[in-house]
Amino acid sequence: MTIGDAVEAPTAIERAARREAARNNAADSKLSDVSSLQVGPSAGVVSPQRVLHRVVLPRPDDPPEVRPLYLDEPENRHGHTAEVLSRSAVTVPPACQLSFATYFNAFPASYWKRWTRVEEVALRLTVRGAGRVDLYRSKSNGEVVHLEGKQLDTSGDQIELEFRESLAPFEDGGWVWFDVATERHSLTVSDAAWIIDEPLPVQPLAVVITTFNRPADCVTALAALAEDSAVLNAIAKVFVVDQGSVKVRDHQRFAASAAQLGDRLVVIDQENLGGSGGFTRGMLEALRTSGIEHVLLMDDDVRLEPDSVLRAHAFARAASSPVIVGAQMMNLQVRSQLHAMGEIVDLKSSFWRPAPGAVAGHDFAQVTLRQQRALHARIHSTYNAWWMCLFPREVLESAGLPLPMFIKWDDAEYGLRAGECGFPTVTLPGCAIWHMPWTDKDDTTDWTAYFHLRNRLITMALHSPYEVRLAIVHEGFRTTFKHLMAMEYSTVALRHKSIEDFLDGPEGLFASLRDALPAVQKLREGYDDARVFSSAQQLPMPLFDPVRMERLLQPPVRPVAIAKRAVATVYRHLRAPKPQTRERPQINVPASNARWFLLGMVDSATVSNADGTGVAFRKRDPQQFRALLARTITLHRRLVAEWAVTAQRYRAAIPTLTSVESWEQVFGQPRSGGTPAPRFGGTPAPRSGGTPAPRSGGTPAPRFGGTPAPRFGGTPAPRSGGTPAPGLLGPRSDPRPGPGPGSASTPTPDR
């Protein structure tokens, strides 16, 4: 095809031929790629409903370290780099190479192959100038395959290229991307996007942000949603659930963001009910809003790539059956670093951890996507944290609302519960937010330690098919030992309260949304390690010299050495400390060195917070040590003896804990007639390990890219399965939304 020919979509016969060729040649990797290239004048703006994934570029105010997430720039002959003209346009100077094999611009084809109806994807881009454009893909093992290429000289005109690639060879992994190279002239690339032929259904989206005394962060998130017109057009509602005393409305930049969002924005003021209470309130408001089909939860303290919202929304609309779509997490402190690629809950060891095959802590500024082969295999997650996570309405209606856990583990428990109902979680590459890494938090030792353990026990009781008591007891004693050796007596006391409250059963969970945090804070007041000073300069200088501290920092390595150090620390904790150490610390310890084998050998120490904002003066107390150790033994015996009965009580309470009626009473919004919340009891929720609930529908939804499915548009196609279930809120008066933000019902008033 020559320049000047019109770009035409392939006919049904051509698509069928490509699909047949892909099937016939699937065993031969050289022949399984069915790709094509078309060149022609600009065909105008592509419908947003056909766009899966825009090619985007850094914003002018982005720090330099984010550039490798968008552009892979090898060393060029004259040291030139590409000139970013806008979020959608870049000029490659003469004698340069530029690759879009990057985190945000390569297309994660294997995830679309596995979970959606898309069978073929097209890369459409506009170019002006002279140079070469090449299309590549990777295999699941990271090997790179060249697909198509074109040498261009537009003579100053603007033309359009369209590369097409079948998703047939991407079952186990692989990305698709394009590269640009120039010689004597520059080449400008603009408006590139990965698209499909048939539009996706129009399914309006609601965004829910829960915030607590972070007005600046929340306004920044709102501004990111409002700055991109495509994102703005996709959003029907933005619910901000403000649970703080410092209000978002009072921030100086709020008015500007509110004006951009218009009547989409609804700010709801309520008391602090934690993340679970805030997000559940937003879910309920979204479900009450006529026409909303997807609900996207987002933390207030994130930095957002706006196209991630569109990518998650497109993926959910293209899915073969309803799935939860989660964003990956980038490190807010090291912007080029992928912190969390995907996570699972290990139901046997009773902990969350990276998903099998997941790469953690990968820095794209050091090793590119093309170079890191481990990033090319598709992974499977069992839940996604709610820093950004999208839920189809059908998931919320079938799986129910979140548990009243306040914070911690509510996202993991919900992902497991939804999975048991037949709704998997997909953590989508190229869809991400920047968030503070948990390595810079003290949430296993501060007040949140209570919620970590209590909610973890609840999650295991509800979902683990294994005999987990031994694993929980083993972890409990090991962790308690470390905390006691480190003089973290308040943390051990919180762990005791966690076990006690878990064994008390589910009846107090809703009340704990209001009562647990004050009780935890009051409990911590009696312990020195819970009192934080702004700096070590508020305390006397340490007794030990730096050399002695350096010797203590050497960790025991061999099993015999570890055993000797453990015995020595226990013996030391049974003896009375030296009197002067009550007033003057022996050493100052940075958070990174606050290990049991060091702190177990001293009588007192100042220890800094993980984020460096303060220090605690920890003091060894043999009386507290003995009492807490004895209580640990007693409670773990109870945990073993009462586990089965307690687990059954929680499973039986699931219908009540996740019901609209129960949550409405928490929010002070009883349904008409003042129907009381159901009593605890009834039929237990199904446990994992049994037969999952069947997904709705019989006949699979039409796939994109093969024989054309009925075109989406106007009235969206009904969900598979025919008549929708009544759902959490009963029959919907208008189950099918009209297009755009205006399809929502009368705006919910601010609360």
Image (spheres, rainbow, N blue to C red):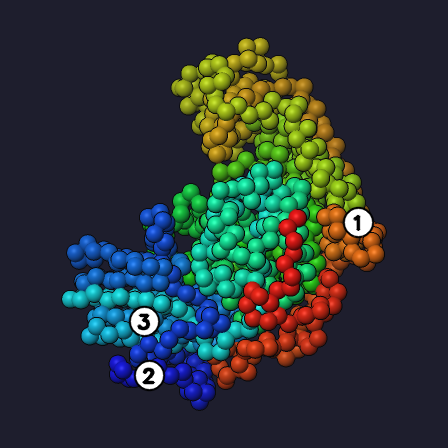
Q: CA distance from mark 2 to mark 3?
A: 13 Å
The amino acid type, in three-letter code, at marker 3 is Thr
The amino acid type, in three-letter code, at marker 1 is Arg
Q: Nearer the viewer, mark 2 or mark 1?
A: 2
As displayed, is residue 126 above or below residue 750? Answer: below
> Which residue, given by chain and number where applicable, does mark 1 sit on?
649
Do we see residue 657 in this rendering? Answer: no
> Would you say 372 lies left or right of 742 here?
left
Residue 126 is marked as 3
Q: Nearer the viewer, mark 3 or mark 1?
A: 3
Which residue appears at 36% of the width and 49% of the height?
61
Crowdedness near tag 3: few (<14), some (14–19) or many (≥20) residues, C-alpha within 10 Å:
many
Relative image position of residue 380 (x, y in whole percent): 54, 60
Relative image position of residue 239 (x, y in whole percent): 60, 53
Q: Say which label, 3 or 1, has the lower sequence index.
A: 3
Disc 1 on helix, strand or loop?
helix
The amino acid type, in three-letter code, at marker 2 is Ala
